[in-house]
Amino acid sequence: MTRQTLREVNAPYTVDPDDESVGRETIIIRRNGEPVAAIVPYAEYQKLLALTELAPLPPQLPSDPQFDKQYAAFQRLLPELLKEHRGEWVGIVNEQASVFGPTSSAVLVEICKRFGDAPMCIQQVREQPRIYRMGGPRIVRSSGNPRQPVFEKIETGTQPAPPDKRAT
C-alpha cells in the first residue's frame, strides 16, 4: 500500500481517468486521519451492487393515514389559501385550515393549545413546495495545513479477501 499526501487540493476532488491506479486499485480518501470516501475499481463496484441486491431492504415506515388525510386536505384547500394567506403557515386539523401564523412553530403551539394531540399537517402556503439545497463538504486549504486530506492507494492484490458469509 502506498501512502501519498496531497499538498494542493481543489474542491471538488477531480480524478484523472488516465491515472494508472484508477481502475486497478482502491483509493481511500482520509480527512484528519479518518477515512471519508473510497474510489474503487468498477469491477469491485459491480460486486458491491450485487451484494446490496441480495441484502434485504430495511423496512419502510408505515404510512400514517391520519396525516395523509390532513395533507390531502391541504392540497385540496391550497388554491383558496393562496388567495388570502400566501407565504403564511397553516395548520390543517380535521381536514380544515384551523390556524395561520408567521412560522411553523407558532402554528404548532396554537394547534396544541386548541386541539391537543390531534392529527395535523403544518405547511407553508406556497405555489411550489420549498426545495432545500444541501451542499457537500467544502474544502479550502492552504499549503502546509496539517489537516490536509490523505489519499492512500491500496493495490487490489494486497487486500485480504472478505470472508465468505455464505460458508457459515
Image (cartoon, rainbow, N blue to C red):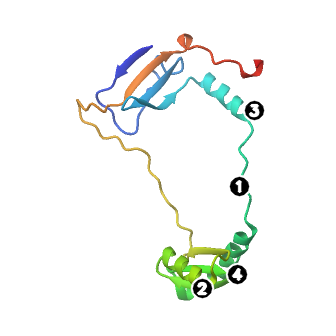
Residue drawn at (63%, 18%) of the image: 162
* Residue 134 location (% of width, % of height): 47, 53
For label 1, the residue is: 61
Q: Is residue 105 above or below residue 22?
A: below
For label 3, the residue is: 54
Residue at mark 1 to residue at mark 2: CA–CA distance: 29 Å
Residue at mark 4 to residue at mark 1: CA–CA distance: 23 Å
Is residue 137 at all visible to an observer of this figure? yes
Hey, what amino acid is under mark 3? Answer: Leu
Residue drawn at (54%, 82%) of the image: 110
Hey, what amino acid is under mark 1? Answer: Leu
Q: Earlier in the sequence, mark 1 or mark 3?
A: 3
Hey, what amino acid is under mark 4? Answer: Glu
For label 2, the residue is: 114
Residue at mark 1 to residue at mark 3: CA–CA distance: 21 Å
Hey, what amino acid is under mark 2? Answer: Arg
Residue nearer the viewer, 50 or 79:
50
**Badge count:** 4
Residue depth check, mark 3 versus mark 2: number of the one nearer the observer: 2
Circle 3 Cα neighbour tier, 10 Å, few/some/many (<14 / 14–19 / ≥20): few
Q: Extreme top residue here?
A: 157
The local secondary structure at tag 1 comes to: loop
Residue drawn at (52%, 62%) of the image: 131
